[in-house]
């Protein structure tokens, strides 16, 4: 398993995985993925093909927001989410970020993994089509 920053050459595989998980992620635009790749804000997990990705953005207020976080169904429960998140946390620490924030549709099983990864549920809000859990992970800078 290789964890690395995505390049434009990875776009097709990322988009395929995103489209396969449209119910969980919603519609993911190619242009948004390209923008994240160009900013260096998209991490992938490779095992011959792309089996997971984490798209995010570092904000000026020291918050990192995760936009999309998905693992190929056949690769779930293997620790890949934790590996991708740890990669992101190391980057957050090096850039002085203070916390990671994400929203997840309340009806998804993915909500079960976030507490195991150290996230705290900080609320629930209405989304366009379904309720969203709000998750926050504090980054402790040394």
Image: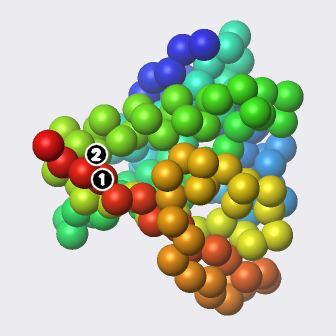
Q: 10 Å neighbourhood of mark 2: few (<14), some, or many (≥20)?
A: many
Q: Is residue 58 visible?
A: no
Measured as percent of width and height from the top left, residue 82 is found at 55, 35
| Depth check, front residue: 98 or 129 | 98
| Depth check, front residue: 77 or 44 | 77
SS at circle 2: helix
Q: Relative to 60, say whether 11 is above or below.
A: above
- The answer to whether marks 1 and 2 mark residues whose Cβ atoms lie closer than 8 Å is yes
Question: In the drawing, does residue 10 fall left or right of residue 90?
Answer: right
Measured as percent of width and height from the top left, residue 95 is found at 18, 45
In the picture of the structure, the residue carrying the numbered disc 1 is 139
Q: Is residue 20 visible?
A: yes
Q: 10 Å neighbourhood of mark 1: few (<14), some, or many (≥20)?
A: some
Task: Please report the residue visible at 60 percent of the width from the left and 13 percent of the height from the top.
Answer: 1
**Image quadrant in which the C terminus is located:** top left
Task: Please report the residue visible at 69 percent of the width from the left and 10 percent of the height from the top.
Answer: 48
Q: Quadrant of residue 73?
A: top right
Question: In the drawing, does residue 26 fall left or right of residue 116?
Answer: right
In the picture of the structure, the residue carrying the numbered disc 2 is 92
Q: Relative to 66, say whether 130 is above or below.
A: below
Measured as percent of width and height from the top left, residue 127 is found at 68, 84
| Depth check, front residue: 59 or 13 | 59
Q: CA distance from mark 1 to mark 2?
A: 8 Å
Measured as percent of width and height from the top left, residue 115 is found at 59, 56
Closer to the chain start, of discs 1 and 2, is: 2
Q: Relative to 90, say whether 2 is above or below.
A: above
Question: In the drawing, does residue 56 fall left or right of residue 59?
Answer: right
Labels 1, 2: front one: 1
Question: In the drawing, does residue 35 fall left or right of residue 30?
Answer: left
Q: How many marks?
A: 2
SS at circle 1: loop
Task: Please report the residue visible at 59 percent of the width from the left and 25 percent of the height from the top.
Answer: 45
């Amino acid at each position: 398993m290789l964890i690395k920053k995505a390049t434009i050459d990875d776009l097709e595989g990322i988009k395929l995985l995103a489209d396969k998980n449209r119910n969980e992620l919603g519609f993911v635009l190619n242009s948004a993925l390209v923008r994240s790749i160009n900013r260096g804000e998209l991490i992938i997990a490779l095992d011959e093909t792309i089996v997971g990705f984490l798209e995010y953005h570092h904000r000026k207020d020291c918050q990192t927001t995760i936009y999309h976080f998905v693992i190929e169904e056949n690769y779930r429960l293997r620790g890949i989410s934790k590996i991708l998140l740890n990669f992101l946390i190391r980057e957050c620490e090096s850039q002085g970020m203070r916390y990671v924030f994400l929203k997840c549709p309340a009806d998804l099983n993915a909500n079960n993994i976030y507490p195991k990864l150290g996230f705290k549920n900080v609320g629930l809000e209405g989304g366009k089509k379904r309720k969203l859990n709000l998750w926050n992970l504090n980054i402790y800078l040394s």
